[in-house]
Amino acid sequence: MQNAEYINIRIHIEGLVQGIGFRPHVYRNAVSKGISGTVENSDNGVDIHARGTEIKIKNFIHDVQYTGVPPAAIIQSVSVTSEAKCLYTGFKIVKSSLQSNSITRISPDMAVCDDCLEDMKKQPERLNYPFINCTNCGPRFSIIRDIPYDREKTTMAEFTMCNTCRSEFININDRRFHAQPIACTRCGPAYFINNMSIKNTDIDNIIRYS
């Protein structure tokens, strides 16, 4: 029995594919199929470099477009080209690159999802936290400073993730896997209300006052 031949390809996807959990979606698909390579945001979409057997690559291309795609994603075009042989160690989400003067579509801010609303009631570090978010919801357009969409190019750049947020950010099975605005009461933005000469930072009191 002959060994299956491995091929290398580049997939370029344009549309609303930044800030909506598309890279984590690609990552999970690749890992589940034994595909090696990288995925990154570019200035005009998402670029994927992948290596695998022909059948695995074929299934990968299909599932990236049609299986478990993030609800907010809008895929406008997909191009697939062959690449020279390149060996990868596993599959990784890598630092975004700027390749042209094209402009990608930016996701609008999205209302808090039901899962995050539940987290606001149960997670100690996110009780009533107004800036809660995940890959399915939260701020996008209002916090972006530049493209490609990465945390360091948003207003969240100055907020260093705490250990809890960092562990969620790197966990492939977590809803906040690579959620760029991820934050909690320990490490994210805080808010307060000024009532005459008194500054109130207690969240429960602020909610009651409002």
Image (cartoon, rainbow, N blue to C red):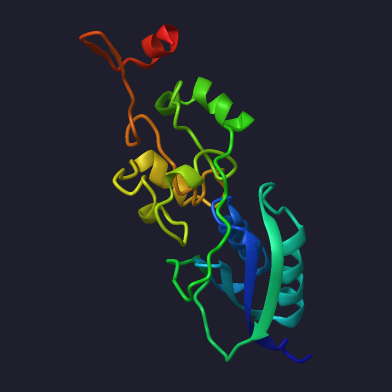
Q: Is 24 left, or right, of 200 in this rendering?
A: right
Which quadrant holds residue 25? bottom right
Q: Check the image and report above or below for 21 versus 210.
A: below
Task: Give coordinates of residue 53: x percent, y percent.
Answer: 70, 81
Residue 35, image x, y percentages: 63, 72
Q: Residue at point 76% right, 92% down?
A: 2
Residue drawn at x 36%, y 45% as measured from the top left? 156
Q: Nearer the viewer, residue 38 or 151?
A: 151
Residue 130 lies in what quarter of the image? top left
Residue 64 can be seen in this image: no
Q: Quadrant of the C terminus?
A: top left
Image quadrant for the N terminus?
bottom right
Q: Is residue 8 left or right of residue 43?
A: right
Residue 27 in the image: above or below residue 88: above
Left/right of residue 105 with respect to residue 62 in the rendered view = left
Identify whether 94 is placed above or below 99: above
- Tally the numbered discs: 0
The residue sitting at 46% across, 52% down in the picture is 170
Left or right side of 132 for 65 = right
Q: Position of residue 202 (x, y in %)?
A: 33, 15
Which residue occupies 25% across, 8% down? 196
Specify whether residue 85 is in view.
yes
Percent x, y for residue 44? 55, 67
Front-most of 174 and 26?
26
